[in-house]
Amino acid sequence: MEEFFQQLTNGLAVGGIYALIALGYTMVYGVLKLINFAHGDLFTIGAFLGLTLLTSLGLSDHMGPLLGVIALAVMVIVLVGLIGFLLERTAYRPLRNSQRLSAVVSALGASIFFQNAVMLIWGARPLVYPHNILPTTAISIFGMDVPLVRILMFSTSLVLMYALYYLTHKTKIGAAIRAAAIDQGAAKLMGIDVNRVIALVFCIGPALGGAAGVMVGLYYGQISFTMGWMYGLKAFTAAILGGIGNIPGAMVGGLLLGVIEALGAAYISIAWKDAISFLVLILILIVRPTGLLGERVADKV
Amino acid sequence: MMNMRTLLLFAVCLLLLALPQFLNPYWTDVFNNIGLYTVLALSLNIILGHAGLFHMGHAAFYAVGAYTTAILNTQFGVPVLYTMPLAGLLAAVFAMVVARPIIHLRGDYLLIVTIGIVEIVRIALVNDVFGLTGGANGIFGIARPMVFGFKLKKPEHFFYLIWGFCLLTIFFMHRLENSRFGRALNFIKEDDVAAEGSGIDTAYYKLIAFVLGAFWAGMTGTIYAAKMTIISPEAFSFWESVVLFTIVILGGMGSIRGVLVGSFLIIGLPEIFRDLAEWRMLVFGLAMMLMMIFRTQGLIPPPPRKYDVLAYLKEAAGAVGGGRA
Amino acid sequence: MSLVQLKDLTKTFGGLVAVNDVSFNVEQGSIVGLIGPNGAGKTTVFNLITGNYVPDTGEVLFDGTNVVGMRTHRIVHLGIARTFQTIRLFQNMSALENVLSGCHCRMQSGIFSAMFRPPSQRREESAAVGRAMAELEFVGLADQWNNAAKNLSYGKQRLLEVARALATQPRFIILDEPAGGMNDHETQELIELIKAVRDRGITVLLIEHDMSLVMKVCEHLVVLEYGAVIAQGGPEEIKNNPRVIEAYLGADDDLL
């Protein structure tokens, strides 16, 4: 029971990260019907930028750990959001009206480009985040000790997810995003500047991914230039699991995948941990490609 | 015109035959790698280039072939080259089993699922599945192949084996392209609903494309295992699939010449700029983006098929029910 | 004799009933028009016949065989060919190759004969090219054989779709708005073409909005509204049917 509970909380903490990254995939897919393969690498860039800013500016020394981390997150969110914006402008916008698969290849190229750019800038060896920032204490829930970091991670991702949910479902610009996702042509006719919506989505998605990058750095301590690839695939699986294009779906899918993976690693085999996620991905695409919360639509002939 | 082409082909073959005499072993080995990647990319070209199926797990089929050879040779003492048909066959069976449930998936979904498959295969190999694959260290001590009592061991020996197989592959691929089969794949790539509506069994042809591509990749796995004498899971990672994918896309989907040029550029060129080796993948990534924006069809798109129709133009009017008035 | 019999076909999408209990027959050797206002479910009926959609209930009998549940290429093989409302040619391929796609289902050679090219493969290939050229000639596009489909005019692309469908050697051909995007002159030629198709012994079912074409070429009309058959009969009979007039008023004045 203790073991189960520990794995559950661990799964939820990691799942929150998957969910944050998955939101980027799902939002871009929603408006452009494009899998942004470079998204995982934007997450990596977030982690590395975070480390550089943290150590060079000494944020947590000047402002204390809490404010320091918040300031760091804000900077990373802005910077990675900007990179996402530039990515859309250069690699995807010119392909807006060409075959869909051309954009997929371009996205793949962007992914390879970013990953290797990170390697050339920060080196091929893994880097380490400072250890002394997050608290190491544990708190007791139902008589079981849960590391405070996990709770912090989980609640941070919930806050960010709620912020996004509020933005997309309660504000005017959010309505524009959802409208563009349903029918770009009609949205245009209704006076929505679809180009601006797409640019915005390409800022928000990567920004959340970048924040997730910082969180992973702080949580696990170690970051490497290839990490975006595995996290990206997992997060994409989460997006598919919840129903791609569906924002609440990405949140549910991320948490669910985190838990499945943690329990799978504990009770089946840790060596097969990554394979479990891929199996989930393949099974869901075969059995229910629209995901848990997605709706079935007939292909028009 | 036809004579010119035959002559040119003949000259190229002669040049290939003589090439190892002018190269040191290092560069001979570079050419061997280019040859291997050409064959692999040509086998992927059936699936990706002709049928338009975004398959990024080709290394999985290659791995099945290479491991089949390695296991049969080291455990059961089967001579390496004898394992080739079986390596191809097992890769083909594997392809049939994994591709069957997923071939109906849309382009980008298929891409991600095939990435998942190649990763699962790699993880399975690392975890020493069935206790046969040797785990993360792989299998070593694969015997050198014998051809008519002659043992192949130097790079120049493998040069002839690899490029001989490559020429054979090009010959068959050229014929497959210009056939009912090749056309059917192209119809599917262009519009699979219309292809099905024109009477083509699209599910069958997609599956056959996978099976045939896997068969060829599996056979190439045998040659790879023989050349390296050591194989390990890392040689069949997702990045191998990315390199193959890039060769086909940059060279020109469905184009044999494109694949050849792509292999030379992507495998050969970095050898010339070895000091800049770590920039290799960055440049590929950039090239993929630029190519999609400025030249979607790749460097050398496939030439249109040739049909001899002049004979029909005259008699055609009379052939169908007397035609219209 | 009825070549095609639709029996109680119903198809719903989510909550929307697109086709509601539709039944009608198509007589061997006839030209039948399926008409009705936009969104009446005409194309859905076509998609049900060709296996693109599977009906919730009902049967499609082709020469006595129920084709419901068969995959589209099997249905084509049985002898039902179609064209698409939104032109679906293989845009980057030549006109000849487009028609060769139709020949595919009457050919045999597989990957081994492609690799080793026995004489039978060469014979089959050249026969197919001959047949494809004959179909191009039949629709008047023989001189365009080497042009990519995307370079043909809209009207010619429609004709190419017809040629591709004919190359499957069908007994029954379904044309979805064949005159869409054609000028008057092309439409006149199309009328002759449709009659010539029928004279080859091929039964025709077509959807068309151009009422002058429908009235000239069809011997029997089936009228659909809100997914249900509201009338059927000869052109004169339909023209004077009060329910049809009501359904069309304001929607399409051409009928009257």
Image: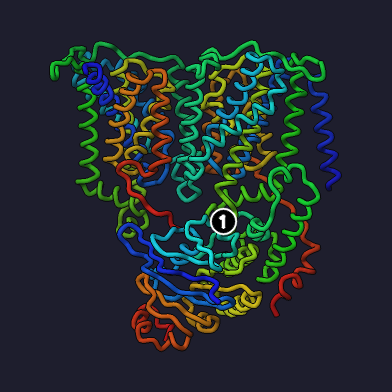
> Could you tell whether A185 is left or right of B103 in the image?
left
Residue at image coords 42%, 60% = C55
Residue at image coords 77%, 42% = C116
> Residue A77: x percent and y percent?
29, 30
> Residue B163: x percent and y percent?
75, 27
Q: Would residue B106 be seen by someone viewing this image from the given angle?
A: yes
Looking at the image, is B252 positioned above or below residue A280? below
Tag 1 subunit: C
Q: Quadrant of the C terminus of chain B?
A: bottom right
> Residue B65: x percent and y percent?
62, 26
Looking at the image, is B176 positioned above or below residue B127? below
> Could you tell whether B312 is left or right of A246 in the image?
right
> Could you tell whether A71 is left or right of B215 in the image?
left
Q: Would residue A79 be seen by someone viewing this image from the given angle?
A: no
Q: Three-letter amino acid code at disc 1?
A: His
Q: Secondary structure at mark 1?
A: helix
> Residue B173: x percent and y percent?
70, 40
> Total number of numbered labels?
1
Q: How many other residues sit within 10 Å of disc 1, few (<14), some (14-19) or many (≥20)?
A: many
Residue at image coords 47%, 45% = B106
Looking at the image, is C82 positioned above or below residue A87? below
Residue at image coords 74%, 29% = B165
The foreground one among A234 and B30 is: A234
Check disc 1 and report the residue beneath it: C73
